């Protein structure tokens, strides 16, 4: 007799394949739980980088309407802080920035909301606003 996992009666025959199978499953669940925690940590880190990028974008645009292309141009020519924040968030092309703005528009970050204004020949126009509680 051996001690069984918490899912089975206290005593089961030694070498019972069910016990071994349950131990194996418990080990796999433990590995999966560790992976989930790791992914949660990565998401929090990515969110922090994205919050910094969004705040830099809000400071740079000051509530004015902009396109992803114009934001990238300002970042690359005038606003080193915005450029650094966008690079840290891996938003290095107008297309990547536009996709990210579309995603963030559905989910405000740190009290900052992105709103899609309209579509023009230059692309989608956006505005970044701080939400006031």
Image: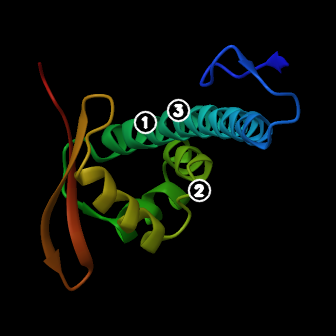
Calculate the distance from the C-alpha at mark 3 to the C-alpha at mark 2.
16 Å
Residue 55 placement (x, y as % from top left): 38, 36
Q: Which residue is mark 3?
A: 44
Give me the residue at 36% from left, 67% from top: 98
Q: In this orientation, which residue lies closer to the viewer: 28 or 115?
A: 28
Q: In this orientation, which residue lies closer to the viewer: 92 or 108?
A: 108
Calculate the distance from the C-alpha at mark 1 to the C-alpha at mark 2.
13 Å
Precedes in sequence: disc 3 or disc 2 = 3
Give me the residue at 70% from left, 40% from top: 25
Q: Which residue is mark 2?
A: 90
Q: Is residue 70 above or below residue 22?
A: below
Q: Secondary structure at mark 1?
A: helix
Residue 23 placement, left or right of 120: right
Precedes in sequence: disc 1 or disc 2 = 1
Image quarter hosting the C terminus: top left
Give me the residue at 48% from left, 38% from top: 47
Q: Which residue is mark 1?
A: 51
Residue 69 placement, left or right of 36: left
Give me the residue at 69% from left, 33% from top: 26
Question: Which quadrant of the structure image shows residue 18?
Answer: top right
Query: How many C-alpha atoms fall within 10 Å of the one at disc 1: few (<14), some, or many (≥20)?
Result: some
Residue 116 placement (x, y as % from top left): 16, 61
Residue 84 placement (x, y as % from top left): 59, 46
Question: Which quadrant of the structure image shows residue 51?
Answer: top left
């Amino acid at each position: 007799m051996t001690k069984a996992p918490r899912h089975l009666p206290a005593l089961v025959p030694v070498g019972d394949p069910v016990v071994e199978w349950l131990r194996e499953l418990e080990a796999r669940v433990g590995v999966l739980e560790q992976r989930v925690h790791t992914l949660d940590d990565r998401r929090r880190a990515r969110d922090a980088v994205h919050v910094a990028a969004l705040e830099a974008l809000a400071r740079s645009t000051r509530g004015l309407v902009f396109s992803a292309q114009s934001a990238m141009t300002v970042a690359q020519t005038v606003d080193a802080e915005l450029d650094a924040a966008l690079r840290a968030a891996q938003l290095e092309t107008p297309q990547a920035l536009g996709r990210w703005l579309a995603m963030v528009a559905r989910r405000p970050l740190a009290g900052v909301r992105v709103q899609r204004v309209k579509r023009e020949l230059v692309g989608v126009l956006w505005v970044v606003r701080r939400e006031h509680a």
